[in-house]
Amino acid sequence: MPITALYADSYFPVGSELEAVHASQPNQLGKPGSWGTGAQRLAVVIEARQACFEAGVLDAPQGFKASSSPELPQVAREFIRELAVSPMDVTKDIYDDARANGLSDPEYVEIVGLVGQIRSLDVFARGIGVPLRSLPPAQDGEPSKEFSESVTPDGAWVPMVPKLPEGGETARALYGENPRPNIIRALSLIPAEMRAHIELEEVQYLPGNPFSGFQLSAARRIDPATGRNRCRQDIRPE
């Protein structure tokens, strides 16, 4: 399928750069990753979609029947379903339970990356009123076992590559010169998942880590008269 045809069925125009990323990223879902095989990674994505169908947050295709993939252990399926449907309810206890039941930090991070990726693509499709895009077949091969060795406990549940200057060249290669928020740094244990997240964020949300270029005035403090945060009226680019 040509890249330009990916959203040909959309009433709304979709930018070519965004469409190109949306066309290329799903191809990675069925390929061996850092810790999961192609079949396992695809099973993660299918499990996330299935959980959303059953919860009613995505429209299930005609003839949909729930199934359980033998590629995933029960602990992984339970975490995927919670993360896909109700990410705000994922707590430290859920993370600790997943770790205690056999899920490693690299596996946890790769699952977070995959679920975040497919939910971004699927919510976008729902938003422009088109059916969910098809998934690729699983590809053979072994996981690379690539992960960042210079991670440390740094304020998140999973170990992360420290910010500059503590993170050194590894941090510079992953984050660039500007600071990255923890929501991105928490994927740094698995560089491939972090890079995929940033690639999608750059075209679908805000490019170039724009928050580092904004300053907040003293008016960001809570207004004592109303109890409201005043920063939303007083954010300005430098």
Image: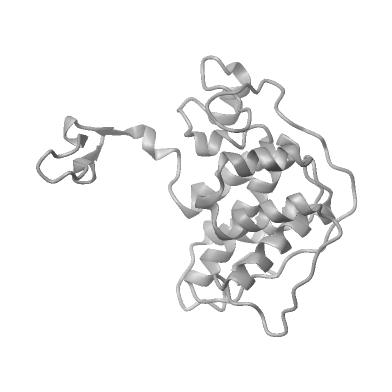
Residue sitting at x 58%, y 35%: 186
Find residue 18 and report its horizontal and vertical position in percent: 53, 58
Find residue 197 and report its horizontal and vertical position in percent: 58, 45
Image quarter hosting the C terminus: top left
Q: In this orientation, which residue lies closer to the viewer: 103 or 204?
A: 103
Residue sitting at x 66%, y 42%: 193
The colour scheme applied to this rendered structure is one colour
Residue pushed farthest left? 225
The mark total stands at: 0
29 above or below 169?
below
Q: Is residue 238 visible?
A: no
**Residue 84 shown left or right of residue 221 in the figure:** right
**Residue 143 shown left or right of residue 210 in the figure:** right
Q: Is residue 46 visible?
A: yes
33 above or below 56?
above
Find residue 112 and report its horizontal and vertical position in percent: 64, 47
